[in-house]
Image (cartoon, rainbow, N blue to C red):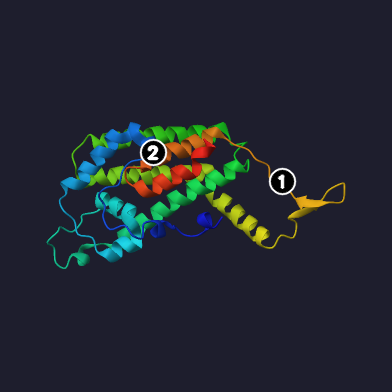
Amino acid sequence: MDEILTPLNHREIEYNAKKLSGCDIPDSFLYKSDQARALFDWVSQTGSKVFDDDLIMDYGTDCLRLYLLFENTPKEHDAPFYESWNEGALEGMYKFLGRYRRMILAASVWNRRGGYCSASEKSIETMRQALEQTQKKIAQCLNRENTITNRHNFVSALMELLNVLQRELKIGEIVTQIRKHAVSEAVPKKAWSTREDGSTGKTNVQIGNNEAVMRICREFIILMAPVACDLSRMLWMEIGTNI
């Protein structure tokens, strides 16, 4: 459970990353590759950028890629270039990626426990509609010029969608329950039950799966993949067997 309960941990995953270039889209995301290429064109059109090694080590390439889309960034010969970075904006992007990661992992764990077996059709439909609306917004942004406004709209659409999914999936409540479960497992007062034959054994956890919920999570990962390649690849592998 630690990977869900701790703050975003992909800094460790990307600790040795030194460049933004060379991040491939997983094969699973190929049908969105046109959008991905258009997005990378946006980044390259703004010219060569300078990244302080400390920024890369602290925030990771996914966070910096999002920053490139959302903010004006320093050019290669700016001096001192580090003064041009807005650390507050970087923290905002970092927290956004943390919420994204936590939501996918928590939803996956909760779904395996059968927590979404009784998910309402209304919630499922709300999330589906939000996904469709976001896909349209992103397509419109990519078909327009490479402007600050369009880049803001692109990232804002993803943030708004995350808010909807977190609310409908009840991620806050789920994380609280997972925390309680983690504590009870650490001090297992009721982890063992006595059977009729007098033997003891761990109580089985009910397993269930709601494919509709995981399909929505999968679609969100696909939308996030062009702007958060490494984190999305990791999350895709984590939940891929549940779909």
Image mark count: 2
Instruction: Indicate the amino acid at tag 1.
Output: Asn
Q: Residue 23 got which mark?
A: none
Residue 15 left/right relative to 198: left
**Residue 67 in picture, x, y percent from top left:** 28, 53
**Residue 12 in picture, x, y percent from top left:** 41, 60
* Residue that label 2 marks: 222
* Residue that label 1 marks: 204
Could you tell me which residue is drawn at 74 percent across and 60 percent down? 189
Could you tell me which residue is drawn at 39 percent across and 53 percent down? 96
For mark 2, give the secondary structure. Answer: helix
- Callout 2 environment at 10 Å: few (<14), some (14 to 19), or many (20+)? many
For mark 1, give the secondary structure. Answer: loop
Instruction: Indicate the amino acid at tag 2.
Output: Ile
Please name which of the two marks, 1 or 2, marks the residue nearer to the observer: 1
Quadrant into which the N terminus falls:
bottom right
Q: Which residue lies furthest to the left in this view?
A: 77
Nearer to us in this view, 208 or 15: 15
